[in-house]
Each structure stands twice: as C-alpha cells, then as structure tokens.
Amino acid sequence: MKSIVLRQKFIDFFKSRKHTFIPSSPMVLKDDPTLLFVNAGMNQFKDIFLGNVRPVSKRVVNSQKCLRVSGKHNDLEEVGHDTYHHTMFEMLGNWSFGDYFKQEAINLAWDFLTKELKISEDRLYVTFFQGDDKDNLLIDNDTRDIWSKLISIDKIIPSSKEDNFWEMGKTGPCGPSTEIHIDLRSDLERKRVSTSSLINRDHPEVIEIWNIVFISYNRKENNVLESLPNTHVDTGMGFERLCMVLQDKKSTYDTDIFSHLITKVANISKLNYGDNVHTDIAMRVIVDHVRAIVFTISDGQIPSNTGAGYVIRRILRRAVRYAYTYLKLEEPFIYILVDLISTQFKDVYPEISEQKSAISNIIREEERAFLKTLGKGLALINQFIIELKPNVTKISGKVVFELYDTYGFPPDLTSLILKEKNLAFDMPEFNDYMQQQKSRSRSASEIVVGDWVHVNKVSTTDFIGYDTLVIQDAELVKYRYVTSRGHKQIHLVFNTTPFYAEGGGQVGDAGEVIFMSIDNKKDTLCCQIHNTIREGNLIIHIANSWPDNHFSNIKYTLQVNYKKRVLTERNHSATHLLHHVLRKKFGIHVEQRGSYVGSDYLRFDFSHFQKIQNSKLVEIENTINDYIFLGSDLEEVRSLPIDQAREMGALALFGEKYDDSVRVIQFSLDSNKSIELCGGTHVNNINEIGLFKIVSESSVAAGIRRIEAVTSQSAYHFFNKKINTLNEIGDLFKNTDNVLKSIQKIIYENKELQILASNANKNKLQNLIQSLDSRIIDLNSLKILTSELDCDIADMKNICFSFFKKYDNICVALVTKSNGKVILNVGFSKQLISNPRFNASTIVNQISIDINGKGGGQPFFAVASGDKIGGITQVLKHFKQIITNL
C-alpha cells in the first residue's frame, strides 16, 4: 500500500466514525515557551488538555509533522545507524476530548489495524501500565481487561512507568498508556526467541507502532498528581513505521517515503546503497535530514546561529559532514533533493511546493557556506599539527572545542582527520568544555514555571487593545509564579485587557496595573507590567513584583504605556510599507521570513538572494517616505473569512497558522494597496509615522536578507547624531563647508604613501632575491639554496616561489624567525617532484627535529615551525646532507 493511500485511509477511517479532521500545525512553535518544535501530535491540542480553550470537536483525527532532535525526545544520534529512527516523522493520531475513553479507543485502534489494514493479529502484542508505588498509582486493570477480550492473555504485557505512563513535561496533563507492538521477524526467529522478551528493547523488527494515552491526571509543580475533571484520549502512531509494515519492508528507509531519495543520492555519489555499512548510514542520514530541513523551512524556520534556527543548521551540517566524509561529495548537492520532496508531498503539504525555490536556495547556500567552513577547519587542524612538539600525539580538547564552537566543525570529523595522521585529541578535556557550555546555556535559559492559581472561572481573555489603552474594573482570572534566569516573576491573566501580547514580530505591551489596597482603602497600589506574552489563547501580563493577598475581590485598572505603544505602532505600520515596496521593487519572491517591531526600531527579514545596493536602499527609503508624507488611512477588517482575505490579495506570514477568521490591515498606496493578515496594532494614518530611515542591510542566512530601520522619534535621533558627528569632523578639518573634499584629499594622500611603501618593499625583496641568487650551489644537475633571512613569513614564501619559477631544478630551504619561533620553508621545482624522493612534506618532517618542531605540506612545498632558535644552522646543514644523498 502506497504511503499517500495509507495516510488517507487512516484519516477516512476516523472521519467515518465522527472524528473531525484537523490539519497538521506547523512544526515550528510560536506560543509555547517549553518547546522549540512540535514533537508529538498532541502539542497543538495542549491548551485543550489544560482547559484554556474549548475543542472545536470532541473527536479529532490528524497527521502531524513532528521533529525530535533535542531534550527528552531526541532521536538524532540514532538516525541512520538503525533502520527506523527519524528526526522528522509524521504522527497519525486520533483524540477524544472528554468523549470516549479506554474501551472505544482500544476498539478503534484494533479495528483499524486488523480489519481495515488486515494486519495479522498473530503478530500484534500490547502493553499496559503496571502501576507505580512512588506515585501511588495502581495497575491499569481496566486496560488489561479490555485487551483480554481482543487478544490472548500471553500477548498482554505489563510495563513500567518509563514506557507506559505518558507525561507532557515536568508539569501538566498525563496518564497511563497502552502500546501496540508488532513482530516482523520470521516464524523461525519468533519460535526461537519470545516476542515478549523483545518488547521495548530497540529490536529493529519488534517495534511499537501505536501508543494510546489515557489522560487522567494533572502533574502539579510539587510533583503531586491530581485527577482531571474530564478524561481524554491522545493517540500517536508512527506513519513511517506503519508504511514499513504494510509495504513488507525491513526498514522505514526502504519504503516509498525514502527509497526514491536514496536512489537519487546513490546516483549523485556513484555508489550503491547496500554495498557498504558506512555509506549506507551516510545515505540514510542525508535523506532523513533533508526531509526534516525541507519541512521546517517550509513551516517558517530558517537556519541560524540561535535557538530553533541553530537546530536546523546543525541537522543540515550533520548531513553535509556525512556526505563529505563517507560519500566524498565536496560540492553542494543536498538542495537537489528538494524537488523530489516537493513533488512527493504536493497534495498533502502544499506549502512545500509553494516555497520550493526558496527552500532549495536556502539549503544550497547553507551547504556552500559550511563546505567553506570545512575547508577552514581542515587548514586549522593542519596548522595545529605543524605546531605540535615532537613525540606529542594528542591535540588539546580545547582546540577541538573551539573548532566546533567557532566554525561549527564536528568533533567526530576532527577525530577522523587526526586518526589518518596517527593522532588523537583529548576527549575528556573536550567533554569538559562542552559540559561547561551546556551548563551556561541551561543556567541562562532555565525557566521554572509554577502552577496556575485560579481566582475565578473565566477561561479566556477579551482583548480590547485595538480601541483603547485603558480599562477599568478588570478582574483577575488566574496567576502563577515563574523563575526565569534566576529572577522571580508573576504571570497574571485578566478577564479583559488592552495590553497587546507579543506576536507577529511585535513586542508585547508594557504598562501598569492600578488597584486599591485591601489593607488601607485610601491607598492606591501600582504594579508595573514589563511585558505581555501569549500562551495559546491566554494573554499573560508579566510583573516582577505583586503585593501579597491582592488577588481576589479587587477591581483593577489596566493602563498601557502610551509612548511605547504609539512608537511601536509606527514601526509596525512602517514594516508593512517596507514589505510592500520590497515586493514592488524586486518581485513577488520577496516574502517575510521574520521581524522584530519594537518602540525603538524595526527589523525585517525577507527572502532575497542578492545584497541590495545603496542606491536601491535610497530608492526604497524615498518611496516609503513619499507614502508617509502623502498619508493614507488605516483600513481594518477585524474578522474576515481567510479564503476571502486571500482573494483580496492579503499577504500571510511565512510558516504561520491562521484561524478560519482573520484580521486584515490595508493602506492605499498609489494605485496599489498594502494588504496583510495581521493581528498587531497600527497607526490610524501612515503620516503619523513621520519619517523612515534604513540604518542597515545585511545577510542573516542563505537567501535571507535583513533590513533594520528607524522611524519617528528614533529617526530624528538618528539624523541628529549624524549631523552632530559631521559637524565635529568639519571642526577637525577646519572646513565645515566641504568636509567630503577634505576627507577625499586625505584618502588620496594615504593611497600615495601606500604605493611608495609597497614599491620600497618590492625593491628590497628584489635586492634580496639577487643576493640569494649568488649563493646558489650547483650539485650535479641540481641547484641548492639554503639561507637564514630577516623578513616576514609571507615574503619568505614569495622568495621561494620566485626561485621555483626561475629554475626547474632547484631545491630550497629558507628560515626566518617570527614571534620567538623558527619558521622553515622547504620546496622543490615542480619538475623535480615527479621523482618521489623529492618530497618537501617528507623532508621537512625529517629535518624539523633540529628546531624542535614539526611540519607538513605538499610534495613541492612544505612548512615547519619550531622553538629551538639555536637549531637554525643545523637544520639548513641537515637539508643539504639529505639533498646530497638523494
């Protein structure tokens, strides 16, 4: 059964049983601070389990894109080395939100596998929760009894909390689970070793295919379990594994999900899949990783140096490294696979084909950049090897860590290169540096979240911030304490608020909450809100402090910081204008890839594959300022069906998931309109922006450009600072009327001086070369030049190559001193190295012992470095002796 048929069969089966199909959410999470990526089907339903939102349907089915590369659920190191782990996978799932429970959930799963898919019952085994004394949880007899009516008792296996009690995290909804496993081994193997002994033992042919979780409890911050008022069902089945079963394969990589990709990689590398264990692993790593990268980029996550972006970059670099090391592919090629993946998923995940060109370009540029890094890393490793003292066979772990940390150079590749030279690195020292980095990272990002304390039963917040910045008589819904980076904060949720929660690139509002003291009714208390964030449908106000016992029976006045909001609105509307002008100037390939909109400046990341020249930036600025000076009223539609909004031409944010009803922001500009789906706050007329100025344009990732700009008050400060600086420069030159002319004169004079200095150095070198020419010794058919020089390292190398160019039979050994070290250059005319005895790399290692050094290079030219200054005469003498005896 083809994968595309199997996926639809699963969805149709549950739709026919009154389940509502919900499309996969993007893998990149926007409103959940606890996760970088979706790692399970339930992530998009988390707020339903927590009681923050009501479900659109009590029965739901979907296929969710998931990524597991960090934290507890991390399959990265297993990928490629076994035949069934993946970084990105699809999780087929069905859910019940307070509807059916154990009996129907188990029956539905069993019917789908055995009746719909005709999988042999003989090969299926199940597990159930055996209880846990520490949490005072009893054995799940209900699940066992339900299974006993469907399958023989010897195939129902009790299992520990580790395998059969699912928890969302340290806190939150949880409950016992039951797993369905399948044994794909031969009949002979099944008779020889019992299946029950291999369950959850990472056997490649005895695998879990479905996990059914019965969410019954809530784990509190104090680790106590409390029963939920409503029970839920959360199931997850690995789509790739199910395909493997239905297509009668021994590996998920042999299914139609991956086989065409592996064939393509094999063709590119001119190697056969199945011939070699190392190349097989490399091919599996590459096809798995490229799929993960394509899906995450299509969902809006661009490779970068931080957060989720770094995870994606690390996955891609891991694939490049495997190709470079094992398949000997040293040019970009992974991007070629994007077209195959786009075609494969065009009907299921159309966002990939819609972004195919951008995704391909991003991956190609990332490959190209890292392959350059690989080259730099190799050069640095060679330099470290040259500088090793004799009899030292191990490089410092600190050096290897710096290669990894600074250049993204994988330590296992460093190890492989060193091994080829009979060297190694200090692994414990490297691990110490890695651990220190991880500890710093954890301490910098660790967040301890307390339990919500409910004050009243309101479950949602009414946002009124589009129309007002102040609300009186607000009620507190709930609060919790959070420790972030060592600082204690309080999170507050009110029934209504004018505070905008961070989202869509716009920063969250700041302001204050004003209320009467319960200790003295005449006193007014004021607490500062320094940020506002969103978790699901909750608008959370963050304060650093709050008076005790002031949580209930109080009416609160919520007041947004006017200046910050107004300046932020001006930057947000300017961002829309910038997006519009960029598309007008460069084409519709320009799409937003990220943004920051604060009160001080705006940052806009967009897809474009060339640096924007200064003249074009000036044109963009002028166009935007023309729009601002002419003015245009905000045209806002608060609630519009998303299909209708798209028909209007509204631009959607890359990778964002929208509700069925959306807010549309429009500004009329010339004969065109800027139309975008946007939940942020904006000016009433764009002339309120005042002034727009681009302050920088740069590259942030392959195929992604960034413009930073200021408006309004910040633009005024920007120009004021520039004018003051220009006046100060004019005062220095005592020519305030024509500062530019004075600077150009100095630049011209400086260039003239540089030319004079360069000519003087060339003359000096030429005289030195003529002097050395007279010291050449003729030996039979060879010419030999040895000398100690007083020049820099680059000049000494140039002198060597000038003699190679002049003579076709010369042997050269030159020495100079630099920073207390001896630098030795050894080389031969290229005509000589056809004879293997004339090998500069071999000879430099033989003679560098005289200067207490070590070296390396190529047959025609090699370099060594040592710290024994007194060995210079001997090393040159040693070179002559070797040449004489050749």
Image (cartoon, rainbow, N blue to C red):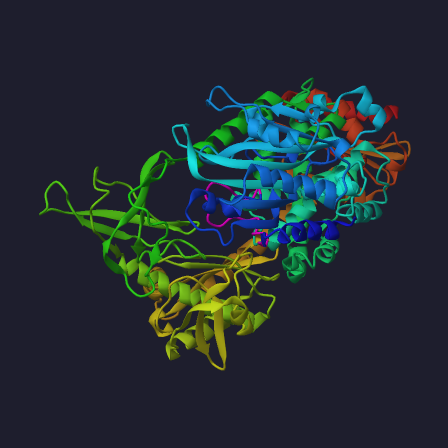
Residue 724 can be seen in this image: no
Q: Which residue: 69% across, 17% down?
A: 391
Q: Residue 864 versus residue 393: which sits nearer the camera?
A: 393
Predominant SS along the magenta part:
loop
The magenta region covers 21-40
Q: Residue 650 versus residue 672: which sits nearer the camera?
A: 650
Is 489 situated left or right of 53 in this image? left
Quarter where residue 776 is shown: top right
Magenta span contains residue 29:
yes
Is 300 situated left or right of 368 in this image? left
- Residue placed furthest toward the top: 391
Is 849 situated left or right of 514 in this image? right
Q: Which residue: 83% across, 42% down?
A: 807
In percent of width and height, residue 374 lies at: 68, 41
Count of numbered labels shown in the rendering: 0
Q: Which residue: 53% across, 69% down?
A: 582
Q: Residue 716 versus residue 357: which sits nearer the camera?
A: 357
